[in-house]
Image (cartoon, coloured by chain):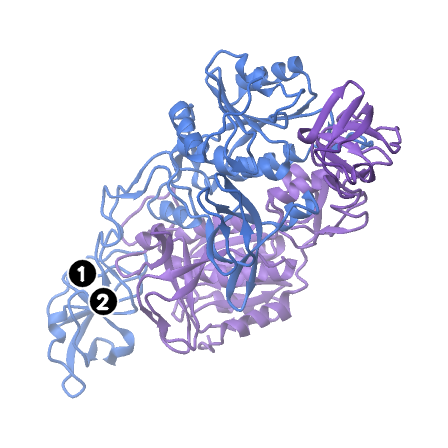
Chain colours: A blue, B purple
Amino acid sequence: MEFFNVISVDEVKNILKENFSDLCINLEEVSILNCLDRILGEDIISDINVPEFNRSTVDGYAIKSSDSHGCSDSLPSFLDVAGEVNMGESIDTKIKSGQAVYVPTGGMIPEGADSVIMIEHVEKLDDITIAIHRPLFPGENVIYKGDDIKKREVILNKGKKITPQDIGVLASLGVGTVKVYKKPKFYIISTGDEIIDLDEELTLGKIRDINGYALYSLIEKLGGEIVNRVIVKDDYELLREEVDKALNTSNIILISGGSSVGTRDFTYDVINSFDGKGVLVHGVSIKPGKPTLIGEGKGKVIFGLPGHPVSSIIVFKIFVEYLVKEIIGINKEINKTKAIMDYNIHSSPGKETYQMVSLDERDGKLYAVPNFGKSGLITLLSKSCGYVVIKSEEEGLYKGQEVDMYFI
Amino acid sequence: MEFFNVISVDEVKNILKENFSDLCINLEEVSILNCLDRILGEDIISDINVPEFNRSTVDGYAIKSSDSHGCSDSLPSFLDVAGEVNMGESIDTKIKSGQAVYVPTGGMIPEGADSVIMIEHVEKLDDITIAIHRPLFPGENVIYKGDDIKKREVILNKGKKITPQDIGVLASLGVGTVKVYKKPKFYIISTGDEIIDLDEELTLGKIRDINGYALYSLIEKLGGEIVNRVIVKDDYELLREEVDKALNTSNIILISGGSSVGTRDFTYDVINSFDGKGVLVHGVSIKPGKPTLIGEGKGKVIFGLPGHPVSSIIVFKIFVEYLVKEIIGINKEINKTKAIMDYNIHSSPGKETYQMVSLDERDGKLYAVPNFGKSGLITLLSKSCGYVVIKSEEEGLYKGQEVDMYFI
């Protein structure tokens, strides 16, 4: 086994980009009722104008604006009511000078009219005559055909994570199904003789498989599919067998535990035992997460994540999420908030440091409160909602400083 | 039909709290692999200590710290190696003065030892003797039994939205299933003669059911279950029939469209036609969203949302989400970010104004960029990721001002 050849976060990202950009993630077609939070695999182009007709934004009378020019409280214009538009119906009447047609909000404005006077500003003299007291400008209270969207305009871009608003947009365009990226397939392997699953008896010296479960839900949140989640003892042959199964069924394999320098760490050798480029990254200058392994086998990507749960969550967030977003080409989305550091935290120079924090709101300000892992892991996990980053050239973060807090 | 009796956002929230706190949402038991983003319906109490044994945080030798006191480079302490702890195994050996036992990171520390010296600081003289050159304090490199979690401690609180970290915590405690709140049941009704579904032909004057689809995915995102989504023509009897079905099958009924003052608005009368308190809220001093209706029938809550999609999204976010969180008792979660206003926006005094915005990151700062609805609805929806609020006593928000941006 070789010793660590530690590289920077940016170097690792470049290696991921260079080696795995063509990791195959196909498209599938889904109903817009099943596409929330999926990643759009096509540009959505409108094949209609929205609106398809000139439309009123108020309840009122559609008129020629020129008929209102010069009118005032003392000098009203009188107009003939030539009809009424019903919601959801089109109208053939063409408005001539001196005429008005009643139009409800959202209703179609008859040809010839270029403005709508609000019903509140209209005096109804009898069933067929109205008086108006103020001038309208052309286009007043009107949304013109295509004002919102022009035919053949790109409305939503490939790579966008689909929101409820987007689903409203798709519905408005009459789009019932969309092409989205298939969920990348993950295989989760926890290694270690001490690791037991939930249905096993906890005896002294054993610990539960925390990583398997935390990674499972991180993958779910990222939009991935979990092919399998297993625990493997510290044994080269057993691990190799399981990774082989994983390479044949999944796109991304996560092995947690077994990536630090030690006698029972077989992950490195297992990665190198398959057809492919083998280990590409062995050690990253981050804290926590230094003993991270990344390799390629049979065209798939294998991550060796640290055994410590916080470290493995951090490495997942930095590299696994980056990889998935990079291959699929997910558009930038902002999943962080500005917050004020509530304590000083120091870091070792030359490393990127990731500090778990919780958010606290006081007097209308958001504070990032660091949770230190000293007293224990579970407390640290259950309290934190995200993390802050101290760049390798920085010495630390200072109380009162504004920082980016990234949500987990 | 009565005219609006407009009340404030806080008054509406009080009415919701007073009338619907007992809206019945039961619990169900689910596997921790299916509980991401669900709301915990019980306190999680640890029935174990974590760790269950004194544990090493490093690879090294467990010793009595008193054996190291006074030692230095020139005056090492010599210790007998009395054994080795294997990962995942317990050890019966009791360490006496002068003895050391090898322990891997995470391994169990034998009785009698109170510290672990890192392997890097140990000189191996032969197979059974080591020399150490620096003193250790009691507890150095040790996590004591129960340090992280004490037996019978509350680890996760009822009402918490379950995160991947929480799932790691549950796994570590050996908790395989948890009680979560059942998904509240929603029934979505879009009203209007002009509203057509995706499979209908778009003829002049008709528009697609945007609200039905946008609300569907907002409910999904909120963690609700959709019992049905239907479109109903502007007809009192048809609407009453559908609402009756909804009251018999759902907890929360959303009727969109038909809540402004107009000849064809039957929502108000329909709500009042069932056994119950009838209409409780008719008009709120917000913009957009003024014509909001809220009522009670057969013990269920009925919302009359505005027909305009942006307004109905805003009202959903302010009141429907509030109601669900209030009934269930969801713990505070922060789903907003601080951002800097990129434009001045003015508001009408006496109203709470909700302005849709997108986020833009420039030079490490986050800007909230207001999207105005003037040029059209779809563009407004597809661009916005959240909203900012202008309180009723404020005149507006100013360019450069720091604001809270709430994610949709």
As drawn, is B89 to the left or to the right of B384?
right
Residue B357 image position (x, y, % from top left): 37, 58
Badge 2 marks a residue whose secondary structure is: strand
Label 2 resides on the chain identified as: A
What's under tag 2, amino acid-wise?
Answer: Gly
* Location of residue B291 with respect to B197 vertically, above or below: below
Quadrant where the image shows the N terminus of chain A: top right
Binning the other alpha carbons within 10 Å of mark 1 as few (below 14), some (14 to 19) or many (20 upward) gives some
Amino acid at pointer 1: Thr
Q: Is residue B307 visible?
A: no
Quarter of image, res A108? bottom left
Q: Nearer the viewer, residue B243 or B114?
A: B114
Q: CA distance from mark 2 to mark 1?
A: 8 Å
Q: Position of residue A209 (x, y in %)?
A: 69, 32
Dot 1 falls on which chain? A
Same chain assignment for discs 2 and 1: yes
Q: Circles 2 and 1: CB distance less than 8 Å?
A: yes
Q: Which residue is mark 2?
A: A83
Residue occupying the far bottom of the picture: A74
The quadrant where residue A191 appears: top right
Badge 1 element? loop
User: In the rendering, at what x and y percent does residue B396 appear?
Assistant: 36, 72
Residue highlighted by disc 1: A93
How far across and down, in percent of the image, does residue B262 sit? Answer: 38, 70
Viewer-proximal residue among A216 and B279: A216
Tag shown at residue B15:
none
Q: Residue sitting at 46 percent across and 72 percent down?
A: B284
